[in-house]
Image: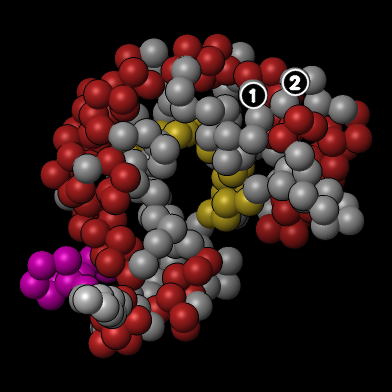
Amino acid sequence: MADGFKAVKINFLSYDRQGKKIPRIETTGPLTAQLREMLEERLCAIREECGYGLEIIMENLCASDATSARGIAEIAKKYRVLFIEEATANFNPELYRVIAQSTFIPLSAGERVHTRWEFYQLLRHNAVSVIQPDICNTGGLSEAKKICDLAQLFDVRVQAHVAGTPLTEAAAMHLEAAIPNFFYHEYFYMSLRPECRSYGKYIYAPQNGILRPPELPGLGQELSDQAMAEAVGRLVVKR
């Protein structure tokens, strides 16, 4: 919050209290009382620490199903969660519609959805309130822009999925600056790490929680000499 960030995204059900990975079989179906208690404790801790000046986004990574997602949403409602990401697998938009109809918490999806035709299935079912197209996965900037325009017809907002290199960061900023239904920019924690930043020639860091789109030609970002050197491979053919 001191750096100006307006929201935080957290996966609350990835690890148990001992730091062990929670298997998906435990996060699907009816949630146990123990898991529900742990989820509530963690949500409560964030709210007590940050108050309501910081939005909470719940990351689920498709680890829940329609049944457990409804249980998660019931608890999330108490703490005014902004939206729940990937409440279940993206392959069945009808399940998203079922979850959406059972809660006031908005749902989001998109990083595993490809092309405007797949997004249309989510949108026409009124299954999500926020889409998260990944420019690399969904067909590039032109296709992503068409997806965002399609989403606007359904009053759906856009938060591009960004969890890659400085190149994808720059591309996402350009996309979000060009659409009227932009919501939030995802600033992945890996973007802060020197080993990730070193792959781009330029650093675009938020100032007081705000990023400015690149003004240089093209994407406004280029692969660094280090990135190019690491990508070079040699093949020796013996005849």
In this rendering, the answer to whether 118 lies above or below 134 is above
Q: Would residue 148 appear left or right of 130 to someone viewing this image?
A: left
Q: Which residue is mark 2?
A: 29
State the SS at label 2: loop
- The answer to whether mark 2 and mark 1 are in CB contact below 8 A is yes
Q: Residues within 10 Å of mark 2 (few under 14, many from 20)?
A: some
Q: Which residue is mark 1?
A: 65
Give the x, y percent position of residue 117. Answer: 25, 24
Q: Would residue 36 appear left or right of 217 to someone viewing this image?
A: right
Q: Quadrant of the C terminus?
A: bottom left
Q: Quadrant of the N terminus?
A: bottom right
Q: Residue at x 72, y 35 (%)?
A: 24
Q: Quadrant of residue 13?
A: top right
State the SS at label 1: loop
Give the x, y percent position of residue 107. Answer: 51, 29
- Given the image, on which type of amino acid does mark 1 rest? Asp
Give the x, y percent position of residue 16. Answer: 83, 49
For marks 2 and 1 on the same chain, the one whose residue lies earlier in the sequence = 2
Q: Residue at x 10, y 67 (%)?
A: 218
Q: Nearer the viewer, residue 198 or 131?
A: 198
Give the x, y percent position of residue 94. Answer: 47, 12
Q: Which residues are magenta?
A: 212-221
- Given the image, on which type of amino acid does mark 2 rest? Gly
